[in-house]
Image (cartoon, rainbow, N blue to C red):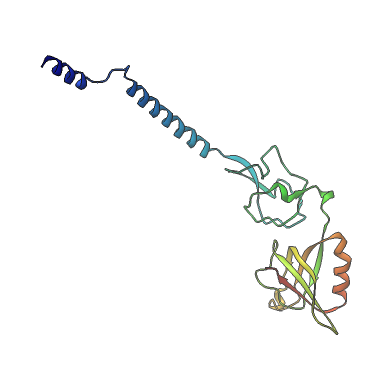
Amino acid sequence: MGAQVQAVAARLRPPGWRDPRLVVGVLLIVVAVVGVAAMLRGADRTAPVYAAATDLAPGTVLDESTLVVAHVRVGDQYLGAPDQAPFGSVVTRAVGAGELLPASAVAAREDFDGRPVAVVTTAPVAAGVDAGSVVDVWVTPEAGASERVGESLPVSAVERDEGSFGLAGETVYVVVPADDVGLLLDALSAASEVAVVGAA
């Protein structure tokens, strides 16, 4: 009987600080708390990067007025501020206002061979075509079928003639590779009708 009483008392005795189960439990709690804290710190980490202050057309020279600094959680594909300031460089593609500036969309002036060409249309230009759009240029000679003479060209600006009620006479400035400028100008000069169509 005495042995049974001692065994029951041993089972009911509260665990002490040296109990292995208590030590393991405390260690698990500490590890969980440290892990959650580290995860929260990592999720809250932001970096300053450059973003477009306004819509930037291809060939736009970057300076303090065209860029703003945004604090976001991103990778290294964007230009960090202020260490990677791209001032004096140009954008090689359209960048919308508020869009983060990718490093791949920036080049030195001498490395950018795009040239703005004014295309005066004889057909209406869709309302959605504006700076930053991508368009195709179609021409129709006096005798012959329509043909596409410019494909997937970025738009740097659009001048709409308010007096024509948007029906014709609009000028779309497209950025053309330097080697293709002559071909496009020849096609425009020989055309009786010119249309600028938004590319899919």
Residue 82 lies, with reference to residue 155, above or below; the image says: above
Q: Nearer the viewer, residue 1 or 136?
A: 1
Residue 5: x percent and y percent?
Answer: 13, 18
Q: Find residue 95 and report its image quarter.
A: bottom right
Toward which corner of the image does residue 130 lie, by quadrant?
bottom right
Q: Position of residue 30 (x, y in %)?
A: 41, 27
User: Where residue 165 appears, x then y in whole percent?
Assistant: 68, 78
Residue plotted at (85% across, 69% down): 184
Q: Position of residue 8 (x, y in %)?
A: 17, 21
User: Foreground residue, 158 or 7?
Assistant: 7
Q: Residue at x 43, y 29 (%)?
A: 31
* Relative vertical location of residue 26 with respect to residue 40 in this rendering, above or below: above
Indicate whether 175 appears above or below 102. below
Q: Is residue 57 left or right of residue 26?
A: right
Q: Is residue 179 above or below residue 11?
A: below
Q: Residue furthest top?
A: 2
Count of numbered badges drawn on the protein: 0
Q: Quadrant of the N terminus?
A: top left
Q: Quadrant of the C terminus?
A: bottom right
Q: Which residue sits at x=73%, y=57%?
A: 57
State the image quarter where residue 189 is shown.
bottom right
Q: Nearer the viewer, residue 152 or 142?
A: 152
Residue drawn at the location 52% of the way across and 36% of the way down: 42
Q: Residue reaching furthest left? A: 1
